[in-house]
Image (tube, grey):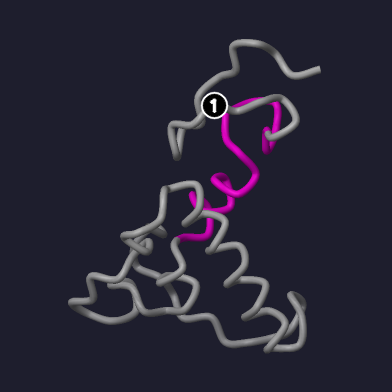
Amino acid sequence: MDQPNPETCEHCGEPVLPSERADNSQPFHHECLFRVLCGSVAHVLRRCSCFVPGSEDGDPPFMSKRNAARAAIQTQRLVDSLLGGAEATREEPTCPKPPH
């Protein structure tokens, strides 16, 4: 059963119920931990400043941080499916900055 006073997600600031936790060590939702590790929709699509100098693309401005995290996962799944699956080989450019 979920606890009555859940911890707060370190990414989005929303409550994290035990059933939503990415792991047992830090309070993150599954999707928020993905977002922290893999970046925004723009990063997944290589449109952020890591790949396009001067770009200001990031999370969609009309979405909450948690919904933007969910969108990043959906975008990554779409990219993987178009490339033949997550195990598909593709040349990965070096990202000079941490994902944002």
22 displayed left or right of 94: right
Queried whether the magenta region covers residue 31, the answer comes back as: yes
The x and y percentages for residue 37 are: 53, 53
Tell which of 5 and 90 is nearer to you: 5
Q: Which image quarter is the C terminus in?
A: bottom left
Queried whether the magenta region covers residue 25, the answer comes back as: yes
- The residue carrying mark 1 is 15
Q: Which residues fall within the magenta stretch?
A: 21-39
29 displayed left or right of 10: right
**Image quarter of residue 47:** bottom left
8 displayed left or right of 95: right
The x and y percentages for residue 87 are: 77, 77
**SS label for mark 1:** strand
**Image quarter of residue 27:** top right
Most distant residue in the top direction: 4
Q: Residue at x 34, y 79 (%)?
A: 51
The x and y percentages for residue 74 are: 62, 67
